[in-house]
Amino acid sequence: MRFCEGEGCTDVAKVGNFCAACSTKQQPAKSKRHPRDAWYQRAAWRGPYGVRRWFIKYHTVCEFIEANGTACTAKSEDVHHTIGWKDVEDEHAAWLIFLGGIQGEFLQALCHRHHAAITMKEMMFGPDQKECR
């Protein structure tokens, strides 16, 4: 048992997070976005001269290597961060990692399929699944 998480409610939730009265109400979804996710919308990343566009321009083929050693030959569409940057305490260090380091050493060009697969694995099993590639 715990206190109900309904807005302004002081009742007890016997099952789950809400009491019987609040469980029937539509509860707003809590945002699971990280505060630094907004960095992806900045011109330094997404703009016409941003890191994302620069990296894909010079890395045109997906850099994913299968377990058997074969390389993907699809066109690169997404840029993946090989090092976790969102929870780095020092904001300047996080910004440097976010932008890919000095020469893009913390980035990897991927096709959309491989980027989605890697991101899903990290979301399911935690950020400790992020590894340098």
Image (cartoon, helix red, strand yellow):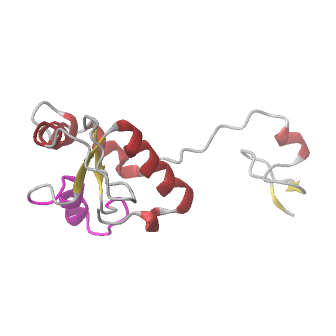
Q: Quadrant of residue 49?
A: top left
Q: Position of residue 8 (x, y in %)?
A: 74, 46
- Residue at image position (85%, 35%) is 24
Against 95, residue 132 (above or below) is below
Q: Residue at left 14%, top 39%?
A: 50
Q: Residue at x 28, y 50 (%)?
A: 71
What residue do we see at 25% from left, 49% from top? 63
In this picture, residue 126 sits left or right of residue 115: right
Is 22 magenta? The answer is no
Q: Quadrant of the N terminus?
A: bottom right
In the image, 49 versus 92, the foreground residue is 49
Q: Closer to the camera, 44 or 132?
A: 132
Residue in front for this viewpoint, 19 or 128: 128
Residue 129, quarter of picture: bottom left
Residue 10 located left or right of residue 67: right
Q: Quadrant of the C terminus?
A: bottom left
In magenta, the rendered stretch is 85-102
Give the tally of numbered discs. Answer: 0
